[in-house]
Image (cartoon, rainbow, N blue to C red):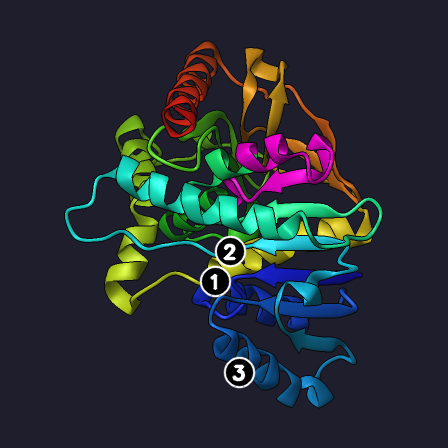
């Protein structure tokens, strides 16, 4: 399987490439970036370690390097300027992203190829990709709340001093301000979170707020997030490569589950070789369902603004 990363010279794209190299599942990794030297340097750095890892083909180049890709990961994006409004940043990123989509239309992707959007605002850009028609809607995924869910589980594990893989808890909806924690089905090694000694609603609020601020916290401490998002990207790409029908909270165009349609956001989604296999009706209580509906409406309002 060939995976191309647009934005592969940046922190997120290069961390994703490294995670995929360590995973050893994909056959070829191609890096593309507006800064061609950065992409070439990252590819060279990865190749230097290849004799100790896996016999993968690792290249870089212009959009021609993307030809033949089975999966295209888009991580390119602009950082927020001081005093810039959220909508202004969104509009700048939408402008950049539309240019990427125009270039991608000229690439000859493999039959059944998928596109994984990581750039923010990921749900808006995922929906733009769906509407671009480059590949069928089911073959477009956004990273969505995969990273938020990983952070959520990690923080719960830290608090209760358990292994993070024993925590099963989801964040659904928008990757952003209106994301929704699904407390009603959260468990630690099969035990409902509300039955765990020491869990309170106040603690839940504290952990969820910490989850929402996790990205900003990492940026403040080390200048940018990359490792966890790289591993999150690897999780989705390998589900595609292995066609293992993994259930992940990726973003995709919704068509009615949880009463949501007409926008892309994260719901429990079976991911396979050609993207979305099936979206499951989430097991949520009435309050969580209402919050998911509000998340969808917030995203629709933003999408209308960038379209207008």
The local crowd at label 2, few if under 14, some if 14 to 19, many if 20 or more residues have their Cα within 10 Å, is many
Q: CA distance from mark 3 to mark 2?
A: 17 Å
Residue that badge 1 annotates: 12
The foreground one among 146 and 194 is 146
- Give the vertical position of 270 relative to 55 (above or below): above
Dot 3: what SS?
helix
Between disc 1 and disc 3, the foreground one is 3
Q: Is residue 173 left or right of residue 207?
A: right
Which mark is first along the chain, 1 or 2?
Answer: 1
Residue 224 falls left or right of residue 184? left
Residue 80 shown left or right of residue 279 in the figure: left
Residue 265 placement, left or right of 275:
left
Numbered label tally: 3
Q: For the C terminus, give its image quadrant.
A: top left
Give the numbered dot on residue 75.
2
- Asked whether disc 3 touches disc 2, contact meaning CB atoms under 8 Å apart, the reply is no
Q: Farthest left residue?
A: 83
Question: Magenta span has 190?
Answer: no
Bin the neighbour count of mark 3 within 10 Å (Cα to Cα): few under 14, some 14-19, many 20 and up: some
Q: Nearer the viewer, residue 9 or 171?
A: 9
Q: Nearer the viewer, residue 203 or 16?
A: 16
Which circle's residue, 3 or 2, is located before the other in the chain?
A: 3
Q: x%, y% of residue 145? A: 49, 39
Q: Quadrant of residue 78?
A: bottom left
Q: Quadrant of the N terminus?
A: bottom right
Q: Secondary structure at mark 1?
A: helix
The residue labelled by disc 3 is: 41
Q: Which residues are magenta?
A: 127-146
Write the residue at 64% across / 51% down.
Answer: 104
- Above or below residue 108? Residue 294 is above
């Amino acid at each position: 399987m060939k995976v191309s990363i647009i934005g592969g010279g940046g922190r997120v794209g290069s961390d994703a490439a490294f995670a995929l190299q360590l995973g050893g599942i994909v056959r070829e990794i191609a890096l593309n970036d507006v800064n061609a030297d950065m992409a070439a340097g990252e590819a060279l750095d990865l190749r230097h370690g290849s004799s100790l890892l896996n016999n993968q083909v690792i290249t870089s180049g212009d959009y021609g390097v993307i030809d033949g890709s089975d999966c295209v990961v888009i991580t390119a994006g602009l950082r927020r300027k001081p005093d810039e409004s959220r909508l202004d940043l969104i509009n700048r990123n939408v402008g950049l992203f539309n240019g990427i989509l125009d270039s991608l239309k000229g690439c000859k992707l493999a039959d059944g190829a998928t596109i994984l959007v990581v750039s923010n605002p990921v749900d808006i850009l995922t929906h733009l990709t769906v509407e671009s028609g480059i590949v069928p809607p089911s073959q477009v995924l956004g990273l969505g709340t995969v990273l938020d869910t990983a952070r959520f589980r990690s923080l719960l594990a830290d608090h209760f001093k358990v292994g993070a893989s024993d925590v099963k808890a989801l964040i659904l909806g928008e990757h952003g301000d209106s994301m929704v924690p699904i407390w009603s089905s959260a468990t630690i090694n099969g035990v409902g979170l509300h039955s765990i000694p020491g869990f309170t609603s106040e603690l839940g609020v504290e952990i969820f707020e910490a989850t929402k601020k996790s990205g900003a916290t990492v940026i403040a401490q080390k200048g940018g997030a990359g490792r966890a998002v790289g591993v999150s990207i690897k999780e989705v790409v390998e589900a595609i490569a292995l066609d293992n029908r993994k259930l992940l909270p990726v973003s995709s165009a919704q068509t009615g589950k949880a009463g949501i349609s007409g926008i892309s956001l994260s719901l429990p989604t079976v991911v396979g070789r050609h993207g979305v296999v099936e979206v499951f009706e989430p097991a949520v209580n009435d309050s969580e369902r209402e919050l998911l509906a509000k998340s969808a409406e917030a995203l629709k309002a933003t999408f209308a603004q960038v379209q207008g």
